[in-house]
Image: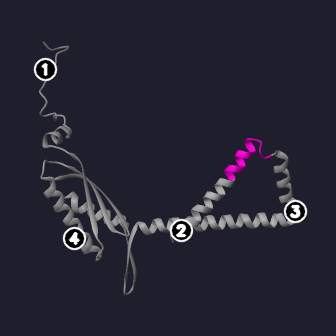
Amino acid sequence: MRFFSTIGVLFYTLVLSMLGGLIIGFTLHLLKLDQVIFLLTSSYTDINLRIVVGLTGVLLIFISTSFAQLILGRFQKERTIAFTNPSGQVSVSLSAVEDLVQRLTAHLPEVKEVRPDVIVNKKGIHVDLRIVLRSEVNIPDFTLRVQEMIKGRVQDILGVEEDVNVRIHISKIISKKDEKKREPTEPPSDLEQPSIPFKGYGRA
């Protein structure tokens, strides 16, 4: 896989470098207009050159398509967790794992907001959490409890023995006073509004 990725990168680098060199040479008049016209005319009229140019175009399209499929397939593979059962292969989307982590942490009374991000690589499953706390808590004890809970739950549900690394970033700590200040104040109802005497025509 890495070999084909390297070949694809070298191919695109070579093609784009050649194209960039031709453009630079044309703009600096290093490549004469007569030469360009002669080359295009020869490629258009000579049957052998037409075949070579056509096959080159087909080859470029094939290599570009293959490399795009390779990149998309690798990206799709990195966004899923796959394992094999006796009856066949099973893949779990990382978005499903992120939803699981969201539900596990959102109900905690200390948490106001949480944003999970799950990444899978050769070293295991990495869960990154950005948490906004709603109260002052003992951060080492709280984060350890959350890490152990998520690690155990993910391993139990997925049935994997891979290492689950849970990294937590406390982005903000909101006190109860700040939270009350952010709550929208509702206007008093008509029953609670004081009655204002009407002064106008026909009244003293």
- Residue 9: x and y, percent? 57, 61
Query: Of callouts 2 and 1, which one flags the residue occurring earlier in the amino acid sequence?
Result: 2
Query: Residue furthest toward the top?
Result: 204
Instruction: Give the amino acid type for the residue marked by disc 1 in the picture.
Output: Pro
Label 3 sits on residue: 46
Segment colored magenta: 19-31
Task: Return the mark for residue 152.
Answer: 4
Give neighbour class at mark 2: few <14, some 14-19, many 20+ (Cα, 10 Å).
some
Please give the label number shown on residue 70. Answer: 2
Kindly report the distance in space between the C-alpha atoms of the residues bearing marks 4 and 3.
Answer: 70 Å
Three-letter code for the amino acid on which mark 2 is drawn: Leu
The local secondary structure at tag 3 comes to loop
Instruction: Check if mark 1's residue and mark 3's residue have beta carbons within 8 Å.
Output: no
Measured Cα–Cα span from mark 2 to mark 3: 36 Å
Q: Relative to the observer, which residue lies in front, 25 or 142?
A: 25
**Precedes in sequence: disc 1 or disc 4:** 4
x and y percent of residue 59 in the render?
Answer: 69, 67
Label 4 sits on what residue type? Gly
Label 3: few (<14), some (14–19) or many (≥20) C-alpha neighbours in 10 Å? few
**In this view, which residue lies farthest toward the bottom?**
86
Q: Quadrant of residue 30?
A: top right
> Which residue in the protein does label 1 denote?
197
Residue in view at x 66 percent, y 64 percent: 61
Is residue 28 one of those drawn in magenta?
yes
- State the residue at coordinates (12%, 53%): 138
Q: Is residue 124 left or right of residue 198?
A: right
In three-dimensional space, the C-alpha distance between marks 1 and 3, rounded to whole angstroms, equals 100 Å
